[in-house]
């Protein structure tokens, strides 16, 4: 089966999006390059297949091009999305604040409720490989795993060198969960006004080049090339926190209400499904209140876990803690 069988709706995607968003998106793209906050550059440099920090950085920045579904060598087709790690971990994880990877080294090893045990950096990389990237785990002894882990461990030094005042300035604006269910119709309006210029009229993004092999300049927010339903961003509160802190890219000015509604709108759309999600969180009481799939240790409907209101769910778990 070739790629167009997998994604029958993809052919001809580039041109309509260019036609509708050309001037705006290209102007913005140029602006981003000028500001030095480029989306993953469209061409990866000739990459050494050895486990160096630099190879790790390339893999994080150009994942679609190096490990995506269009590789000529089938053994290197490790992700089914065409995202890059840097689609979410901005500037290859070196941007401070929301979803930064600067402090990752100090977070591991740690207990993971989702995995139900202790996890290392390598295990966490593979969680994003299988969920956010909708792919397969990297072999622990592969040059790719060693390179990414080496790169992430090296980032701590940059964080160490950042002064306290600067660190505080980098803190993402606090997100307070609205006391209501998300409103998908309002979310669609926010999407139309603030997101579609870059992410495309149908949320399917804008390819970096005519060949899909190079991945996206503006990544898709749902659909076959996006993150799957087991990913962290599929949780509405995680997505809302990231969106409030970072989107629209370069002008993150959404209110809590707008971020909440647009996160729910994106996450109400179809995306790849991961098998075996019912095995996550062996201790169900540790499942986040906004986990978008069951089973749960409570009787609230799935719809409420996906889109709120969250206050009653949070209060239920608070009351369980008291003796
Ligand atoms: C100026 C262009 C631009 C606008 C406007 C914009 N984004 Fe983005 N967005 C990007 C780029 C570029 C990335 C990937 C970052 C990179 O590659 O460096 C991204 C990444 C994302 C991601 C994570 C990756 C993915 O595909 O899921 C989400 C979620 C997201 N944007 C949501 C939004 C939402 C919601 C809005 C509207 C409120 C929005 N964006 C507006 C450019 C934009
Ligand atoms: C669709 C968005 C998305 C993409 C793409 C993505 N991640 Fe993540 N990643 C997340 C989210 C969300 C978290 C959880 C953050 C949290 O728990 O607060 C996370 C967490 C992590 C962490 C743990 C960070 C820490 O400090 O504890 C690592 C390591 C990581 N990702 C690596 C990667 C790598 C490597 C790739 C590419 C193979 C990748 N991610 C792709 C969204 C993404």
Image (spheres, rainbow, N blue to C red):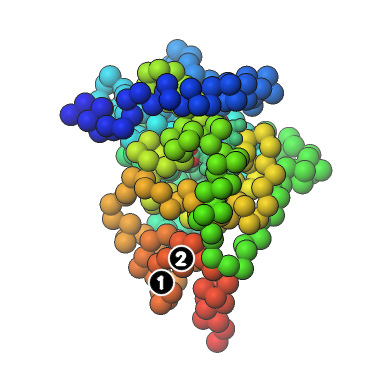
Q: Which of 55 and 169 is in front in this view?
A: 169
Does 227 sit above or below residue 79? below
Name the residue: 55% across, 44% down. Answer: 191
Which residue ends up furthest to the top in the rendered image?
46
Quadrant of the displayed image that contains ligand 1:
top right
Q: Residue at x 55, y 41 (%)?
A: 192
Above or below: residue 119 compared with residue 178: above
Disc 2 and disc 1 in contact, CB within 8 angstroms: yes
Task: Please determine whether, in this image, residue 321 is positioned above or below residue 138.
Answer: below
Q: Distance between the residues labelled 2 and 1?
A: 7 Å
Mark 2 burial class by Cα count in 10 Å: few <14, some 14-19, many 20+: many
- The residue positioned farthest toward the bottom in the image shown: 323
**Residue with the most extreme right position:** 165
Left/right placement of residue 83 relative to residue 312 reads left
- Residue beneath the point at 46% across and 65% down: 305
Observer-nearest residue: 294 or 323?
294
Looking at the figure, which quarter contains the C terminus? Answer: bottom right
Cβ at disc 1 under 8 Å from ligand 2: no
Q: Position of residue 43 (x, y in %)?
A: 48, 16
Helix, strand or loop under label 1: loop
Label 2 SS:
helix
Figure label count: 2
**Residue that numbered label 1 is attached to:** 301
Q: Nearer the viewer, residue 107 or 257?
A: 257
Q: Quadrant of the N terminus?
A: top left
Q: Position of residue 112 (x, y in %)?
A: 46, 57
Q: Is residue 65 visible?
A: no
The residue to which callout 2 is attached is 305
Q: Where is residue 295 in the image (x, y as percent from the top left)?
A: 35, 68
Q: Which residue is drawn at 77% across and 43% down?
A: 169
């Amino acid at each position: 089966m070739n790629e167009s069988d997998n994604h029958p709706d993809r052919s001809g995607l580039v041109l309509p999006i260019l036609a509708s968003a050309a001037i705006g998106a290209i102007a913005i793209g140029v602006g981003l390059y000028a500001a030095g906050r480029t989306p993953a550059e469209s061409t990866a440099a000739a990459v050494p297949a050895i486990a160096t920090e630099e190879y790790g950085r390339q893999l994080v920045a150009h994942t679609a091009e190096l490990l995506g579904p269009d590789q000529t060598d089938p053994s290197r087709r490790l992700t089914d999305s065409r995202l890059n790690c840097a689609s979410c971990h901005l500037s290859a994880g070196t941007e401070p604040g929301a979803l930064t990877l600067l402090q990752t080294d100090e977070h591991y090893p740690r207990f993971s409720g989702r995995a139900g045990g202790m996890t290392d950096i390598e295990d966490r990389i593979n969680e994003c490989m299988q969920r956010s990237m909708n792919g397969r785990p990297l072999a622990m002894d592969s040059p790719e795993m060693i390179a990414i882990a080496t790169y992430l461990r090296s980032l701590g030094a940059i964080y160490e060198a950042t002064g306290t005042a600067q660190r505080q300035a980098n803190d993402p604006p606090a997100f307070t969960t609205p006391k209501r269910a998300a409103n998908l119709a309002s979310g669609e309006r926010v999407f139309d006004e603030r997101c579609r210029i870059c992410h495309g009229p149908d949320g399917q993004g804008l390819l970096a080049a005519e060949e899909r092999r190079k991945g996206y300049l503006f990544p898709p927010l749902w659909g076959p090339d996006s993150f799957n339903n087991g990913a962290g961003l599929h949780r509405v509160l995680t997505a809302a926190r990231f969106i409030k802190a970072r989107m629209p890219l370069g002008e993150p000015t959404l209110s809590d209400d707008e971020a909440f509604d647009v996160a729910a709108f994106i996450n109400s759309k179809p995306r790849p499904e991961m098998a075996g999600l019912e095995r996550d969180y062996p201790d169900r009481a540790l499942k986040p209140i906004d986990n978008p799939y069951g089973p749960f240790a409570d009787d609230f409907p799935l719809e409420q876990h996906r889109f709120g209101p969250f206050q009653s769910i949070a209060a239920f778990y608070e009351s369980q803690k008291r003796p």
